Amino acid sequence: MCKILLVEDDLSLIDGLSFSLKKHGFEVIVARTITEARKSFTQESLDLVLLDLMLPDGSGFELCKAIRQISSVPIIFLTASDEEFNVVMGLDLGGDDYVAKPFKLNELVSRIQAVLRRSASKPRQISELSSNGITVNLLEGRVVKNGVDLELTSAEYRLLCLFMQNPRLLLSKEQIRQRLWDRDCFIDDNTLAVYISRLRDKIEDTPKQPMFLITVRGMGYKWNIE
């Protein structure tokens, strides 16, 4: 049975969500504050976290960042805000999906199942990727270019790994969204282009004239190997 940590302070929502999730076969642990969530996270073996953004003792972003330092457990944000800034920030910090309130319970359950499937199917084959003077240590989540550590956000890191794992292969924008975020409703073409641009700023010698991460106009992107 999959165990879900629900981090939410709205009692009416807690009751409805807990009932629905248990009905679908999930075990639910409830935390109403960041403090309670941290305690539950250290005491329980969790399969997924449902995380509200606005909590009595801080922001869900803060908790997500802390979790990502020690765990790759899937995280789905729950929030009343669907502003692009919050969407991008949540994904940058390592969130796997983002659901804006109000939402239909059946839709949320479908999202949870999709994220769990994706998490379970992630291959664990190699421990290192290397090309174009860039090395990714997959066990440590560390990226080095010509001996210098690069500071990447979670989204930038996942993008880089995807491209380096598929050298010279043209990846459409839809394929990238599906592989990294499962749904394209929150990641449109403009947002993806921002991620690509930010990644180029960190990995390319001349970001305005990229040699590694190439745009194929009207089709997508590909990782070029020197």
Image: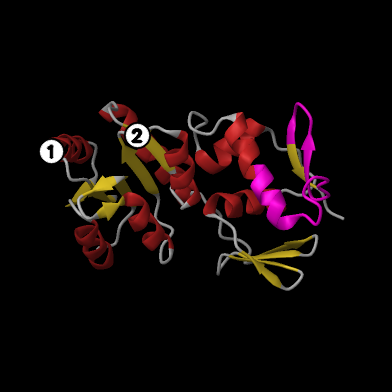
Mark 2 crowd level (few <14, some 14–19, many ≥20, 10 Å Cα)? some
Quarter of the image where one finds residue 82: top left
x, y percentage for residue 214?
A: 79, 42
Q: How is the image coloured?
A: secondary structure
Q: What is the quadrant of the C terminus in the image?
A: bottom right
**In magenta segment, residue 215:** yes
Residue 3 visible in rendering:
yes
Question: What is the secondary structure assignment of the residue under circle 2?
Answer: loop
Residue drawn 61% across and 61% down?
125
Q: Amino acid at mark 2?
A: Ser
Left or right of residue 224: residue 186? left
Left or right of residue 118: residue 3? left
- The answer to whether marks 1 and 2 mark residues whose Cβ atoms lie closer than 8 Å is no
Residue drawn 37% across and 61% down?
67
Mark 1 crowd level (few <14, some 14–19, many ≥20, 10 Å Cα)? few
Residue drawn 52% across and 30% down?
184
Q: State the mark number for residue 81.
A: 2
Q: Relative to residue 95, is residue 66 depicted above or below?
A: below
Residue drawn 63% across and 35% down?
175
x, y percentage for residue 92?
A: 50, 49
Nearer-the-camera pick, 69 or 123? 69
Q: Amino acid at mark 1?
A: Asp
Measured in 3D between alpha carbons, the distance from the residue under mark 1 to the one under mark 2, in whole angstroms, is: 21 Å
x, y percentage for residue 16?
A: 16, 34
Left or right of residue 26: residue 222? right
In the image, the segment drawn in magenta is 196-220
Residue 1 visible in rendering:
no
Question: What is the secondary structure assignment of the residue under circle 1?
Answer: helix
Q: Relative to residue 199, is residue 145 depicted above or below?
A: below
Quarter of the image where one finds residue 169: top right
**In magenta segment, residue 114:** no
* Residue at the spot of label 1: 15
